[in-house]
Image (tube, grey):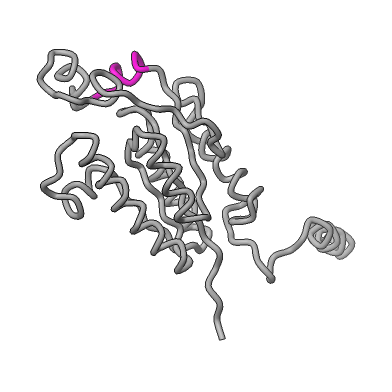
């Protein structure tokens, strides 16, 4: 009888254009390469398919994030790594979802707003600063930074690969993956067992 692998929700949060989607896609590929089941819930895609008709008031944003969180909860409890790359600007909703999901890893993609503006290929910040987009996070609507995220990414200072490794190391520390991105579990080697295997291979002349 097969058993489900333990999974978690990896919740990226940060300003628009801070680098959340880029890292989410990199993590998705890495985890899938390691044999995991993974789903990404990107903010734009969710709004088109799951939250069509919602606006950008605080109430509507809260509804949107709760819907994403509910889907993440269903995926995670069924052994699927759920990756959310929505802005999720309000701390109380993120904390609510942490409580609901349980296996929840918050990744704060920290980036100065000036750098986010420079990166913004869609020109949304420019429109927001001109007053064309009301209630835009980081301009006319607040972004509440996490107080105790599991991972903090400085995306204006770090290379994406280094940031990815930081996330994977935390997932390994928490017991969700091994160092190379594969699952841990009853069939995984402990560090002591791994050293014994390496020694045996060395004695046999393979390494």
The quadrant of the image that shows the C terminus is bottom right
**Relative height, residue 60 to residue 144 (above, below):** below
Q: Nearer the viewer, residue 59 or 137?
A: 59
Q: Looking at this view, is 169 or 55 the one in front? A: 55
Residue at the far bottom: name it.
Answer: 1
- What residue is at 35 percent from the left and 26 percent from the top? 143
Q: Quadrant of residue 183?
A: bottom right
Q: What are the residue bounds of the magenta stretch?
A: 113-120
Is residue 116 inside the magenta stretch? yes
Q: Can you name the residue that lies furthest to the right here?
A: 203
Q: In this image, 46 relative to 165: left or right?
A: left
Q: Is residue 170 magenta?
A: no
Residue at position x 31%, y 51% from top? 68
Is residue 95 toward the left or the right of residue 16 in the image?
right
Q: Main secondary structure of the magenta part?
A: helix
In the figure, 152 relative to 52: above or below? above
Q: Is residue 105 above or below residue 35?
A: above
Locate residue 74, reporting x and y percent.
39, 64
Q: Position of residue 205 (x, y in %)?
A: 84, 61
Q: Percent from the top left, x then y, of residue 65? A: 31, 45
Residue depicted at x 84% and y 58%: 192
Q: Quadrant of the N terminus?
A: bottom right
């Amino acid at each position: 009888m097969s058993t489900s692998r333990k999974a978690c929700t990896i919740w990226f949060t940060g300003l628009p254009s801070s680098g959340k989607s880029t890292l989410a896609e990199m993590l998705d590929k890495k985890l899938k390469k390691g044999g995991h089941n993974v789903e990404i819930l990107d903010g734009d895609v969710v709004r088109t398919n799951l939250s069509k008709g919602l606006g950008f008031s605080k109430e509507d944003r809260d509804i949107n994030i709760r819907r994403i969180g509910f889907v993440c909860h269903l995926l995670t409890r069924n052994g699927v790594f759920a990756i959310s790359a929505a802005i999720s600007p309000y701390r109380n909703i993120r904390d609510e979802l942490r409580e609901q999901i349980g296996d929840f890893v918050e990744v704060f993609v920290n980036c100065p707003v000036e750098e986010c503006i420079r990166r913004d290929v869609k020109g949304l910040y420019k429109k927001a600063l001109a007053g064309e987009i009301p209630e835009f996070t980081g301009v006319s609507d607040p972004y509440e930074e996490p107080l105790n995220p599991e991972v903090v990414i400085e995306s204006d200072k770090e290379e994406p690969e280094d940031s990815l490794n930081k996330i994977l190391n935390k997932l390994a520390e928490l017991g969700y993956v091994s160092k190379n991105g594969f699952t841990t579990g009853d069939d995984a080697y402990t560090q002591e067992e791994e050293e014994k295997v390496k020694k045996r291979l060395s004695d046999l002349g393979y390494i």
